[in-house]
Image: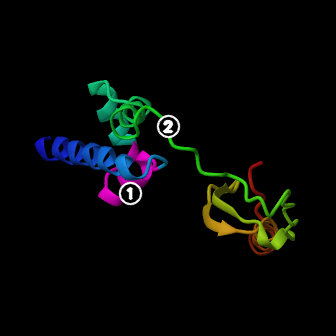
Amino acid sequence: MYLEENRFRRTWERFLEVLKSDYNCSLSAVCREQHTTFGGMTSWMSRRGYSVKQAKADVVRDYYGGVAPSPLPTISPAFTQITPAMLPEEEFSLAGITITFNSGTTISVKRATPGGVIKMLRDYEKTEGDLCIL
């Protein structure tokens, strides 16, 4: 427990340090850098009454003379709109599928296209004569 407490405290101190030079940094980025889970970090902060919003307000008061830095632009001025291209079905993928057949046979598919799953079901039904549970 002491090691975990120490890790979260060090991560919080690192976040406060990074905020001084990069107001737009995120806690999740610092957690990744410090090899700390974001969920564990937010739970630790909650138990102590710490918040990112308050930390940023304190940094503005103490290090930026009370004036918040301008936020980073989120949209490049060179582009007004980006339209996503439609992908063919074969580029979409399904993940974590479990199929159970009436016989009790279960198949787990890590990743496949919808067409690939349908083909696999048809092939299985042809060879085994077993329908899947809908």
Query: Which residue: 62% across, 55% down?
Result: 104
Mark in the foreground, 1 or 2: 2
Is residue 116 left or right of 61 when viewed as pictured? right
Sequence-first disc among 1 and 2: 1
Q: Residues within 10 Å of mark 2 (few under 14, many from 20)?
A: some
Quarter holding the N terminus is top left
The secondary structure that dominates the magenta segment is helix
Q: Is 31 contained in the magenta span?
A: yes
- Residue 125 placement (x, y as % from top left): 79, 68
Q: How many numbered discs sit on the rendered protein?
A: 2
**Furthest residue to the left?**
2
Say above or below: 95 vs 50. Answer: below
Q: Nearer the viewer, residue 63 or 108?
A: 63
In the picture, residue 70 is in which quadrant? Answer: top right
Q: Which residue is mark 2?
A: 68
Q: Is residue 112 visible?
A: yes
Marks 1 and 2, how far apart at CA: 25 Å
Amino acid type indicated by mark 2: Ala
Query: Which residue: 28% across, 43% down?
Result: 12
Query: Which residue: 85% across, 57% down?
Result: 80
Mark drawn on residue 32: 1
Point out the stretch of residues depicted in magenta. Answer: 25-38
Q: Secondary structure at mark 1?
A: helix
Q: Residues within 10 Å of mark 1 (few under 14, many from 20)?
A: few
Is residue 98 left or right of 90 when viewed as pictured? left
Amino acid type indicated by mark 1: Arg
In the picture, residue 4 is in which quadrant? Answer: top left
